[in-house]
Image (cartoon, helix red, strand yellow):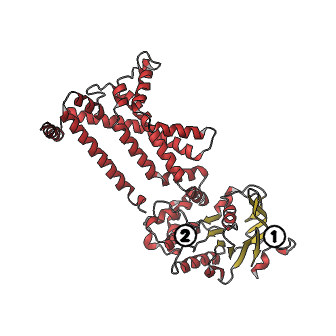
Amino acid sequence: MELWAATQEALRMLFTGDPELWGVVWISLKVSGMALLIATPVAVLSGFVLATVSFPGRRAVVVILQSFLSFPTVVVGLVLYVLLARSGPLGELGLLYTQTAMILGQAIIAFPVLAAFTLASVQGADRIVHETAVSLGASPSRAALTTLFEVRFAVMAGLFNGFGRVISEVGCAMMVGGNIAGSTRNIPTAISLETAKGEFSQGIALGIVLIVMALVINGAFHTLQGEGQLK
Amino acid sequence: MTAAKISTTALPTALPTAMPNNESMLFIKRLTKSFGERQLFAINNLSLRPGTLYVLTGDNGSGKTTLLRILAGLEPADTLDMTFAGTSTTAVYPPEWRQHIIHVHQHPYLFQSNVEANVAYGLIMRKVPAATRDVLVSEAIHWAGLDARRGVPPKRLSGGERQRLALARAKVLEPKLLLVDEPTANLDRHARPQIVLLLQNMVAAQRTVVVACHDREIIDLPGVVRLDLTDGALTTA
């Protein structure tokens, strides 16, 4: 059976350390990791400000942020493509079909997830957290930091959710990365290409990597949460 | 009798206690609070002394919790003319009062760390040096009978232990005025006396303690001054 043979070949590639396969995995991890590194501080701060500061138009910003949660990644890719294309406004930077472009795209995709999770968790934190801190002598800004720290597990859940979204997205990576072997070919674009060519084994192997990664990350998260989440 | 120190809207303002005196820790000349059209309460000339346990009683919705929150600076009053530990305000609650007035919520929020870190929080905010802090934290934990629970996360504590931790976290800051909202409301028969004992301890250390509650075990304690908040007026019972 073809599928069984392809799976066996996939496992062989995984366990013999096939350099091309693991190179693709490395590019994926690097690009998505960098994207989160860039997006997280800005997104967490934005979510926190949205949850705690009232200003005109705040409601509209929240609605837009939440709609971006379900924004198709391929549209993000399209917009970025138009901006980065040689004839586009940022064409001179020469970023199209580079890892930098992919990182940029994934940071944009991760941003609403991280910001919305932070927003929801800070809003969900009882007002009493802030009041307790203030009553014990914390300044308003310090009390805000305490509140953020108290909802850290929810914010982290947002981080893992964001990672899940960017590591597996294919639309934007394909458009602005271009699926160049050894440079911008990551797990989702490789799976897409190999499958289109009828080469299932590499696709299956990369699929296994993605699933194992999801399990490991979630396992790590639950261990980290430990006591924090026990009710 | 301690009641002579207290006058309220129900009493004429000409009583000798109408003026702040040296014995007074907190003197409210006038404090009012309304929600929309409805005036919740108007308090005139209330004096609270150190080393006294005040029990604030009144029906649900009478404003006990709101009064405690105003005194803690957690909620604004409509009119606020009051003197605390020698400083006065006629409008805005001075933030520095919060260093000496600690409020303990009915369902205290305990930080998601452990017993020790919760007790240390206020000291860290006050920039107390680590060495001193460790000693004070240990003392407060011992005071609350939580020595064996030092490293335990709050979620593993019983209701009584949680309330004792909240009191230890306040006590370690040596507040001049301690405001406690319904500390025994959700506790069983065995846990209540421990809380009562800790409150009495605070009073013995010359703190002013105001407890909002319906608990007879506290109301009937010797030396307790009862403040009753009914129909927007505070009277001594």
From the image, tell me which residue sits under label 2: B168
Q: Nearer the viewer, residue A204 or A88?
A: A204
Measure the C-alpha gap from mark 2 to mark 1: 35 Å
Q: Residue at x 24, y 33 (%)?
A: A23
Q: Return the x and y of residue A142 as percentages of the image width and height.
A: 56, 51
Asked if B12 appears above or below B117 in the picture, the reply is below
- Amino acid type, callout 2: Ala
The reply, left or right, for residue A189 in relation to residue B104 is: left
Q: Return the x and y of residue B37 as percentages of the image width and height.
A: 76, 57
- Amino acid type, callout 1: Thr
Q: Quadrant of residue B127?
A: bottom right
Q: Is residue A200 visible?
A: yes
Q: Return the x and y of residue A150 as percentages of the image width and height.
A: 49, 55
Chain ID, mark 1: B
Label for residue A115?
none
From the image, tell me which residue sits under label 1: B9
The reply, left or right, for residue A130 in relation to residue B41 is: left
Q: Residue at x 24, y 38 (%)?
A: A206
Q: Quadrant of the N terminus of chain B?
A: bottom right
Callout 1 secondary element: loop
Q: Is residue A145 visible?
A: no
Asked if A66 appears above or below B217 in the picture, the reply is above
Q: Residue lying at the far right in this picture: please name it.
A: B14
| Whether marks 2 and 1 lie on the same chain | yes
Chain ID, mark 2: B
